[in-house]
Image: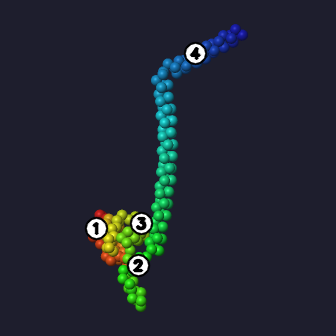
Amino acid sequence: MRARHSAMSRTISIWSLALILAAAAACSADPAKKEKAGFIRKMEQESEAFAKKKMEERARQEARNKQQWEEYRKRMEEEAARAATAVAPPVAAAPASSTDDVQIVLSDKDLTFVVLNKIRLMQHRSTISVECKDGVVKLFGEAESAEVKQRLVSELKKLPGVRRVDASELYLPVQ
């Protein structure tokens, strides 16, 4: 019985050895498979590295955008405060008894700033440009609707220093 057992274990060992050798031969015999697997691994690693790099770039860009927005907001607040406190002297001296006839004169730059702020307050997504010269406000761009255009012109006429509003180049959206 022992002889049979040892013969059987030799047979199993031979088969195990043959299977191991066949598997090793199959793996080493096909360098194309190894090369393909290595290429796929390398591509996966490069893809992960690229995605990580892009995510870091996007995070940096978002941080820059947030910082620029904050700087812009601060600048606008400072200029609004400056424009609110800086009042130009009246054009002509008003009579001592009448204060209703006082005329405020703003520089073209200050008037442009005041008009742009008024437009931004009235219209969030404004595509309107402004040119101010000697109290005449020229509007360029696209108004959201005819009602908005009309309201904008009437509100701008109420601003101090505005003599006339020219909205001839303020267009309505094409529908």
- Marks 4/2: CA distance? 105 Å
Quickly name the residue at label 2. Answer: 89
Tell me which amino acid carries mark 1.
Glu
The correct choice, above or below, for 42 with respect to 83 in the image is above
Tell me which amino acid carries mark 2.
Pro
Please tell me which of labels 4 and 2 falls first in the chain. 4
The residue drawn where x is 36% and y is 64% is 127
Please tell me which of labels 2 and 3 falls first in the chain. 2
Question: Which residue, as the protein is rendered here, is positioned at the far bottom?
Answer: 97
Left or right placement of residue 52 versus residue 103 in this view: right
Mark 3: secondary structure: loop
Quadrant location of the N terminus? top right
Question: Which residue, as the protein is rendered here, is positioned at the far front?
Answer: 93
Quickly name the residue at label 3. Answer: 124
Please tell me which of labels 3 and 1 falls first in the chain. 3
The mark lying in front, picked from 4 and 3, is 3
Is residue 113 visible in this depiction of the protein?
yes
Within 10 Å of disc 2 (Cα), the crowding (few <14, some 14-19, many 20+) is few
Tell me how many marks there are: 4
Mark 1: secondary structure: strand
Is residue 148 visible in this depiction of the protein?
no
Quickly name the residue at label 1. Answer: 169
- Marks 4/1: CA distance? 89 Å
The mark lying in front, picked from 4 and 1, is 1
Mark 4: secondary structure: helix
- Marks 1/2: CA distance? 32 Å
